[in-house]
Image (tube, coloured by chain):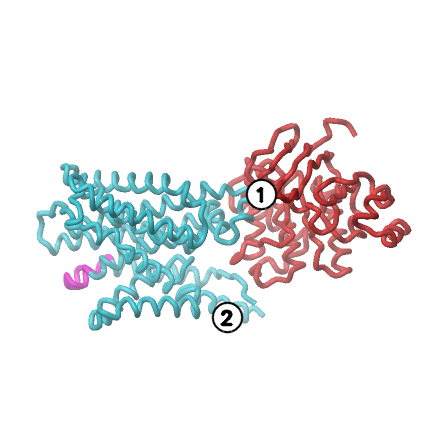
Amino acid sequence: MLVRDEGNFSKSINLIIIAVTIIVLLLLPRYISGYYIRLFTAIFMYASIAQAFNLMSGYMGYIPFGHVMFFGIGAYVTAIFMGRGLNFIVAILLAALVAVITSVILGFPVLRLRGHYFAIATIGMNGALMSVVQNFTDITGGAMGTTLPIIAKPPALVYNYFYLAMFSLMVFTTLLVYFIIHSKFGYAIRSIKANEDAANSMGINTTSTKVITWAIAALFTSLAGSLYGYWMSFIAPEEVFNVMISVNTIVMMLIGGAGTILGPILGSFIIEVVSEFAWSGFMEYHLAALGIATIIIVFFVPRGLVGTIADLRNRKMVKIKQ
Amino acid sequence: MSENNIILDIRAISKNFGALRAVDQVSFQVHKGEIIGLIGPNGAGKTTLTNLVTGDLKKTEGEVFFKNCNITNMKPFQIARIGITRTYQVVKPLEGMTVEENVLVGSLFGRENRSNNLAHAQKIAGEIIELVGLDKKKNFLVSDITLPDLKRMEFARVLAMEPEVVFLDEVMAGLNPSEIEESMKMVKRIREDKDLTIIYIEHIMKAVMSISDRIIVLHHGKKICEGPPQEVCNNPAVVEAYLGKKYAKEVINN
């Protein structure tokens, strides 16, 4: 029998491990080269998106394959406003606002769909948005892409900035998801995944819960997109609206553990490191390996690494009690 | 009973599924504190009627009033918030959560204007889990408990929502005779405890007869009879449609 048990002892150990990890990661840029700083920045970026995705699918059970559209919105709206002379902070906030408004407007019709239909509808929306960006050449720079202002500081310092910014985004996203899940609203989210009809008949306004959750996920994804655009200082529609970004984050979330708080972070670390070191040797098999890995996870470790470890731990505790 | 005692007033509601009229112009009134038995052959429209009142299905015709307030076009979550809840014939537990969490969701949401405090909701959930006798299994995942326990859990979840009117849709189906006995005692005890009005859908005649104040019989979507248990058993139309002559005699003699 599987019984839930969160011992206080293991909880405090977890907290210590997390605190140490955060301090180490904060100090890390002093000791590693620019290459590794960029790698870690990418890991943090993916972890933030995977965490936003986790709230939406790991906890609520809706899988928005086209979720990358908010990444693209974040990057492009930031680029457009910075191109008009606004500073980065204003541009990133405007981009977040645009992403949230878009998610709410699209959410009301599309969140009526369930399962595959919802997933596919979001892919369609992402495709539509991408072609809008490709064709409004005057504003967006069209299919050729557009540039963002380059920060006039030494590159090493700039990389450090983005390292810290992405790291803060990841920590902030994770904390927020943690607090949401442990609140009343979190129970509404989890009830929707568990059984949407039952949730509705228990007094949960499922429609507004779904739309708000998607808006939160869109907000964090767009923040990651804005930072990415400014970091790269060049973006193209086929790059930032690439569905493969969604697919990557889904795999990261699944490997780490969907519906667990640390899963998406662990997953993005594993996938990014593996793809950096192992797959660069055989680029052409990259996608096949990703696909096979996903199938294996879904069949054999559906709860992901963190989820499976937690299950094993709980089982052990139950045995000890008995 | 006086007019202002009416808590639920169902006025000529109907439901069409394509050409099939699943519920046909059914009207009845429920008084506060009553237990109404809703019986009828398979496919008579009992569950559909429940779904119409709780908003799970849209009504083709007719209106529903709760305490003189028109709730005809409300959504299920709104109806739950004003105090009408139901259990499901085919149980709908919140998978992946424990028994305690399931009941906790009921006490967190459910009736409107209640505390948002998690600790308070947890306390209520704990009390109700004890009331239905599930305290030993409260930390079990719902996928790990038996069907009778799942039905208890659903009942607990409904109680945690602090409703006034509860539809119990075949809470005893699949239970053995001793479990039925136990379940009946529990329903009676809790009704008095919580001052509930219950609409009780059941096939097990013994249970319905002993527990109900009034019985309503549906057949082919129409209400064919309404009255106290003894009277309903003697009604020729009910005997013809549902009980059968031999069984009717047995029930009356008991």
| Residue occupying image coordinates x 13% and y 53% | A157
Question: Closer to the camera, A16 or B206?
Answer: B206
Where does the C terminus of chain A fall, quadrant-wise?
bottom right
Decide: is B165 above or below A118.
above
Q: Are marks 2 and 1 on the same chain?
A: no
Point 91% across, 51% down: residue: B253
Is disc 2 placed on a helix, strand or loop?
helix
Left or right, A174 with respect to B14, comes to: left
Q: Residue furthest front?
A: B19
Mark toward the viewer: 2 or 1: 1
Q: Which residue in the protein does label 2 denote?
A: A316
Identified at 50% across, 70% down, the residue is A316
Residue B55 position in % (x across, y down):
59, 40
Residue picked out by circle 1: B56
Residues rendered magenta in the picture: A26-38
Relative placement, left or right, of A147 versus A274 is left
Image quadrant where residue B182 sits: bottom right
Residue A36 within the segment the image draws in magenta: yes
Determine crowd level at label 1: few under 14, some 14-19, many 20+ residues with C-alpha closer than 10 A.
Answer: some
A188 in relation to A289, above or below? above
Secondary structure mostly seen in magenta is: helix
The disc placed on residue B10 is none
Chain containing the residue with disc 1: B
- What amino acid type is highlighted by mark number 2? Lys
Amino acid type assigned to the residue bearing label 1 in the image = Asp
Q: Nearer the viewer, residue A158 or A145?
A: A145
Chain identity for the colour cyan used in the image: A
**The magenta stretch spans residue A253:** no
Q: Tell me where residue A139 sits by quadrant.
A: top left
Q: Dot 2 falls on which chain? A: A
The N terminus of chain A - image quarter: bottom right
Q: Do we see residue A71 in this rendering? A: yes
